[in-house]
Image (cartoon, rainbow, N blue to C red):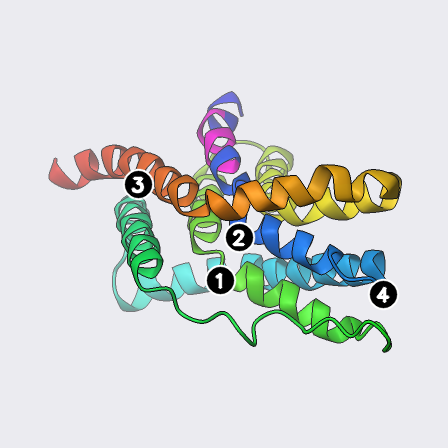
Amino acid sequence: MNELFARTVPLALGAMVSPTLLTAAILVLSGHVSQRSRTWAFVAGGAAALAAFTLAVPWVAGLLQSVAGVTLDRIDVILGALLLAVAVRVLLKRKNPAPAAGKAPRHRETAAPHLLEYCGYGALMIATDASSLVLYIAILKEAGQSSAPDAARAAAVAMGYLAVMLPALVPAVIATLAPAQTDRVLKPLGTWAKEHATPITVAICLIFATYLLIKGLPPLIH
């Protein structure tokens, strides 16, 4: 069990760092109508999408193993390569930024909350949070192949799930429990995260790509 958590805790810490998800949650809070309801709808949509992803990963892994012969030993290398690809994509996107219009719901300050739109926005942001999802797959892989008790494996998966959701959960919790502090705490944090999103994401991808490749290549070579 200790070995399982030694392998998954660092991955969870990496999955927790998502400037994109954090800034999206703070963007939702920047409106003036039903901010907390919209933010929790954003969280609920992300949580539902991540739950569906969690259920789909074992099925896809089994399909790859039976159809393409992809073994668990190769998955670390594949995930490491994916993280390198994400780092390259982020750097290229910074040089040639694509317009982001249409992704976030347009705040309607005099209209109804439109919670389904914000729920869908949360699902979209989770689905496109590539670095965190790759690290979450690595956590699911470690839990799946571990000989630890079922409770420990479930705890490892739950820890990874919470880590991915934390950048969305923290603003929602702050806005709910300390609404007076929302502007003072979250807006500067959102500005900082947006300005440093590229170096943070690239650093996370490179660190964990190196870790996964070092871990996954020796069994394939030998």
Label 4: state its secondary structure. loop
- The amino acid marked with disc number 2 is Thr
The Cα atoms of the two marked residues, 1 and 4, are separated by 26 Å
- Earlier residue among tags 2 and 4: 2
Height in image: 54 above or below 170? Answer: below
Mark earlier in primary sequence (1, 4): 4
Residue placed at 63% from the left, 40% from the top? 189
How far is disc 2 from disc 4 in space, using C-alphas? 23 Å
Residue 161 place in picture, x, y as percent: 60, 46
> Residue at the spot x=27%, y=35% of the render?
210
Picture coordinates of residue 5, whole percent (x, y): 52, 27
* Residue of label 3: 209
Q: Nearer the viewer, residue 113 or 110?
A: 110
Residue depth check, mark 1 versus mark 4: number of the one nearer the observer: 4
- Where residue 134 appears, as percent x and y from the top left, is 42, 50
Mark 3 burial class by Cα count in 10 Å: few <14, some 14-19, many 20+: many
- Specify the label residue 33 is tagged with: 4
What is the x, y in percent for residue 127? 52, 63
Q: Which residue is mark 2?
A: 20
Question: Magenta span covers which residues?
Answer: 6-12
Q: Which comes before the other along the chain, label 3 or label 4?
A: 4
Give yes or no for contact between labels 1 and 2 (Cβ–Cβ under 8 Å): yes
Left or right relative to 158: residue 177: right
Residue 164 sits inside the magenta stretch:
no
Q: Tell me which residue sits at (85%, 65%) in the image.
A: 33
